[in-house]
């Protein structure tokens, strides 16, 4: 991934150095397991512990000749050792090391992502509570519907991200796995104890059955989780973009002193952070397709998945890490304009209370169809002639004989629509 969208913490986990370090840990732990079984002398394992090392440049140099990265790695490590080098990679196939190390590497990555998800959830929750009672227009199909609050909007984000965290944890558990079962998964030349020992030391689970590789449905499920989180962020970002339109201006991304919105138009304040989120989400979803393509391997494995995974897993996790941190900052610093929200509620001449008028009529004895057909022409007149809907209701002879002035006043009170806000916040877990 390009540096622009890469945080140093995540970059370190995907570095070549960390990759080879995890390979080395698997190799050393495998020798420990063999020693426990009495196959490798413990003094040789101690020498391997003390002397085993690698040099990235040397690995790449050897790979130029071998055209095999694991062979290049093991030969490089062996150059740092004496006679005990013969036990390096003993009984293993390349993917025993690569996939097990990958599971351990993803465990490290997942710890960072989990921190980001949890921090993001906390930011949304705090903002939701802050704006629990900030009344605004609810819109369906882009059209004014009925009043809601900005806090309730954020509460839906909060709930969605909590679901995302549950899904992520399940998917993360799937890929935090190892396999040291040999060339086709039969443990022909290595006992299951070695796999169990190594995985236990790395705090990952041994895959119950494998071929030469871990089954790639695990990684497809994991990528699905990442893509869904990115898509949720895109959904939230799209909402901010919509609410920042000039004709609405209900929220606005923080605009720093000295920041520029356009090279041509000095007045511009664009929601560039939210737009950035939408673009990056597309990249992660694109990688999801590749992850699904990687599931169908030939027989006990082929290597078609490998080249793709070298791109999609680092890129997707790096991007999601960046998205969580950047969009969390956007939400935390978001400027909210409550007065604009109230102003926009009145832009449609109080038509947003049409359902309440209809229900009041039903409560007083009309059928729903009668009430609907009585109210709808008045809403059409308000739309077409840009006149106040309440005045039309109050001036309608039929309605005025059914509803009292107090009935009409209560129908046009936005507080009616917000009476269950606290109940919803409690259900979501934002209030005790």
Image: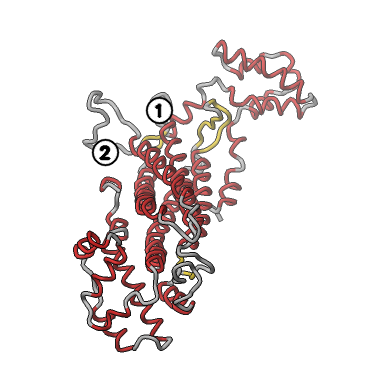
Q: Mark 2 to mark 1: distance in Å? A: 19 Å
Q: Quadrant of residue 397?
A: top right
Q: Secondary structure at mark 1?
A: loop
Would you name the residue on which mark 1 appears?
A: 245
**Residue 17 position (above or below residue 267):** below
Task: Give whichever of discs 2 and 1 has the lower sequence position.
Answer: 1
Return the x and y of residue 408 as percentages of the image width and height.
66, 25
Return the x and y of residue 355 as percentages of the image width and height.
66, 27
Would you name the residue on which mark 2 appears?
A: 256
Confirm or deny contact between disc 2 and disc 1 (CB under 8 A). Answer: no
**Residue 309 position (above or below residue 414):** below
- Residue 125 in view in this figure: no
**Residue 158 position (above or below residue 383):** below
Return the x and y of residue 87 as percentages of the image width and height.
32, 80
Give the number of the disc on residue 8.
none
Nearer to me, 352 or 310: 310
Residue 165 in the figure: left or right of residue 77: right
What residue appears at the point 38 percent right and 50 percent down from the top-left corner? 308
- Residue 180 in view in this figure: yes
Return the x and y of residue 129 as percentages of the image width and height.
48, 47
Q: Residues within 10 Å of mark 1 (few under 14, many from 20)?
A: some
Q: Secondary structure at mark 2?
A: loop
Q: Residues within 10 Å of mark 2 (few under 14, many from 20)?
A: few
**Residue 324 position (above or below residue 350):** below
């Amino acid at each position: 991934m390009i540096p622009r969208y890469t945080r140093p913490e995540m970059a370190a986990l995907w570095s070549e150095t960390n990759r080879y370090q995890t390979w080395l840990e698997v190799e050393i732990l495998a020798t420990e397991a063999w020693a426990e079984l009495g196959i490798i002398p413990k003094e040789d394992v101690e020498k391997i512990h003390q002397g085993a090392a690698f040099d990235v440049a040397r690995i790449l140099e050897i790979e130029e000749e071998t055209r095999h990265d694991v062979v290049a790695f093991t030969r490089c490590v062996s150059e740092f050792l004496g006679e005990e080098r013969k036990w390096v990679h003993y009984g293993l196939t390349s993917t025993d090391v690569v996939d097990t190390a990958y599971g351990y590497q993803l465990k490290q990555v997942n710890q960072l992502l989990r921190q980001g998800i949890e921090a993001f959830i906390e930011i949304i929750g705090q903002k939701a509570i802050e704006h629990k009672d900030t009344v605004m227009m609810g819109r369906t199909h882009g059209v004014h519907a009925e009043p809601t609050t900005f806090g309730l909007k954020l509460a839906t984000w909060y709930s969605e991200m909590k679901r995302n965290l549950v899904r992520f944890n399940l998917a993360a558990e799937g890929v935090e796995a190892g396999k040291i079962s040999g060339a086709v998964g039969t443990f022909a030349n290595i006992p299951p104890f070695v796999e169990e020992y190594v995985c236990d030391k790395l705090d990952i689970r041994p895959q119950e059955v494998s071929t030469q590789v871990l089954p790639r449905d695990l990684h497809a499920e994991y990528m699905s989780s990442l893509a869904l989180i990115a898509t949720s962020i895109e959904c939230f970002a799209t909402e901010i973009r919509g609410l920042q339109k000039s004709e609405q201006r209900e929220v606005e991304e923080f605009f720093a002193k000295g920041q520029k919105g356009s090279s041509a138009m000095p007045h511009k304040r664009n929601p560039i952070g939210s737009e950035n989120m939408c673009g990056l989400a597309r990249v992660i979803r694109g990688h999801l397709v590749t992850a699904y393509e990687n599931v169908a391997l030939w027989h006990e494995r082929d290597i078609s998945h490998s080249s793709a995974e070298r791109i999609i897993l680092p890129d997707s996790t790096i991007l999601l890490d960046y998205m969580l941190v950047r969009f969390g900052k956007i939400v935390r610093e978001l400027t909210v304009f409550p007065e604009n929200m109230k102003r926009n509620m009145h832009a449609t001449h109080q038509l947003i209370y049409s359902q309440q008028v209809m229900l009041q009529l039903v409560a007083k004895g009309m059928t729903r169809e009668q009430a609907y057909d009585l109210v709808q022409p008045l809403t059409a007149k308000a739309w077409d002639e840009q006149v106040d809907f309440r005045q039309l209701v109050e001036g309608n002879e039929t309605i005025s004989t059914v509803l009292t002035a107090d009935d009409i006043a209560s129908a046009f009170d936005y507080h009616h629509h917000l009476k269950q806000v606290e109940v919803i916040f409690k259900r979501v877990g934002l209030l005790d």
